[in-house]
Amino acid sequence: GAVVSQHPSWVICKSGTSVKIECRSLDFQATTMFWYRQFPKQSLMLMATSNEGSKATYEQGVEKDKFLINHASLTLSTLTVTSAHPEDSSFYICSADRQGLYGYTFGSGTRLTVV
Amino acid sequence: QKEVEQDPGPLSVPEGAIVSLNCTYSNSAFQYFMWYRQYSRKGPELLMYTYSSGNKEDGRFTAQVDKSSKYISLFIRDSQPSDSATYLCAMSGKDMRFGAGTRLTVKP
């Protein structure tokens, strides 16, 4: 089946530093990947849509200069949280759209804690 | 009004009970309807998907879609403690939207 690997699963960083999260489709090519943010007891909030070889499309209210997305290949998308602050602490999840299958395959998520 | 409404619960049932989870939506353009299960600190996993109105059964799970009422349901029969998780409904047309998720606990 379709597998999406997300790494790291958790990270603690100091305020002001940058953190990179990777999302890989292991057994299929993903032309489109999505990045979500989830706060405790809340639903997934779409942050941006990542398209291979082109710029990401950000949802309203999401700072593109703070959340840098790169989708350099058909199997890898990265989200970099730049100059992280405590309010950026959250659960970040990626998903990939495998063409021909309904629904998306999600990564296992990354819990970011900024101290 | 949110595009997708889902009661966040929490919902607690005894083992063996029938569980009913529901979502309503407002966008008539949604065509595909999905249910995801999310365990704590994990990404969501696809449980069921349906297209258009009707029922779909997979083992102990039944997904139901009523497009005329803009209402979808997920039924879990003979619920087990391992079913304890948050269940998210999702639907898509041009874009995909998620419900808030219902936290379910099945007590042994």
Image (cartoon, grey):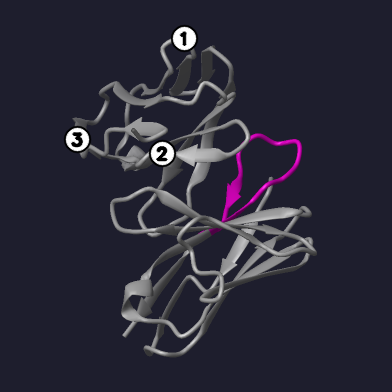
- Packing grade of label 2 (10 A; few <14, some 14-19, many >=20) is many
**Closer-to-camera residue (A9/B91):** B91
For label 3, the residue is: B12
**Which structural element holds mark 2?**
strand
Residue type at numbered disc 2: Leu
Residue B79 in view: yes
Residue B75 vs A48, above or below: the answer is above
Residue B51 vs A25, above or below: the answer is above
Residue type at numbered disc 3: Ser
**Closer-to-camera residue (B58/B31):** B31
The label shown at residue A47 is: none
B28 vs B18, left or right, is right
**Which structural element holds mark 1?**
loop
Tell me which label, 1 or 3, sits earlier in the chain.
3
**Between marks 2 and 3, how big is the CA–CA gap?**
16 Å
Furthest residue to the front? A60
Residue A30 vs A75, above or below: the answer is above
Residue A11 falls in which quadrant of the image? bottom left
Chain at numbered mark 2: B
Question: Percent position (x, y) of residue B25?
Answer: 41, 26
**Foreground tag (1 vs 2):** 1
Question: Percent position (x, y) of residue B96?
Answer: 55, 39
For label 2, the residue is: B88
Can residue A96 be found in the magenta stretch?
yes
Question: What range is drawn magenta here?
Answer: A94-108
For label 1, the residue is: B68
Please give the name of the residue rendered at 57% of the width and 23% of the height, measured from the top-left corner: B50
Can residue B64 be found in the magenta stretch?
no
